[in-house]
Image (cartoon, rainbow, N blue to C red):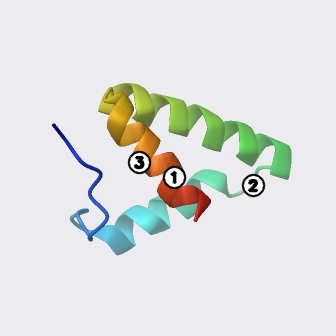
């Protein structure tokens, strides 16, 4: 059984964040929203564990 990892776990986290911001540069709000939706679905598919995805949604909601 896998649980959501909420502690820092990304090597080069600052670089990843900069890349994420750069992904949205030059795009409208609507385009950025669509990029985010596609990215979420791609990552959810990669994770593939419904329990982990439910934990992530709960954590994101606050």
Which residue: 59% across, 32% down?
38
Q: Residue under circle 1?
A: 58
Q: CA distance from mark 3 to mark 1?
A: 5 Å
Mark 1 crowdedness (10 Å alpha carbons): few <14, some 14-19, many ≥20: few
Which residue: 43% across, 32% down?
44
Q: State if disc 1 and disc 2 touch (CB < 8 Å).
A: no
Going from N to C along the chain, the mark reached first, 2 or 1, is 2
Q: Position of residue 22 (x, y in %)?
A: 57, 59
Residue 24 vs residue 6, the one in the foreground: 6
Q: Position of residue 2 (x, y in %)?
A: 19, 41
Residue 58 visible in the snapshot: yes
Residue 17 figure quarter: bottom left
Residue 31 figure quarter: top right
Q: Nearer the viewer, mark 2 or mark 3?
A: 3
Q: State if disc 1 and disc 3 touch (CB < 8 Å).
A: yes
Residue 26 numbered mark, or none:
2
From the viewer's perspective, is 56 left or right of 25?
Answer: left
Q: CA distance from mark 2 to mark 1?
A: 31 Å
Quarter holding the N terminus? top left
Quarter holding the C terminus? bottom right
Q: Residue under circle 3?
A: 55
- Residue 42, compared with residue 15, is above or below; it is above
- Residue 21, compared with residue 37, is above or below; it is below
């Amino acid at each position: 059984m896998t649980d959501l990892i909420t502690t820092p776990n990304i090597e080069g986290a600052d670089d990843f964040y900069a890349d994420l911001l750069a992904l949205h540069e030059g795009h409208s709000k609507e385009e950025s929203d669509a990029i985010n939706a596609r990215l979420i679905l791609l990552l959810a598919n990669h994770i593939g564990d419904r329990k982990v995805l439910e934990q992530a949604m709960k954590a994101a909601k606050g």
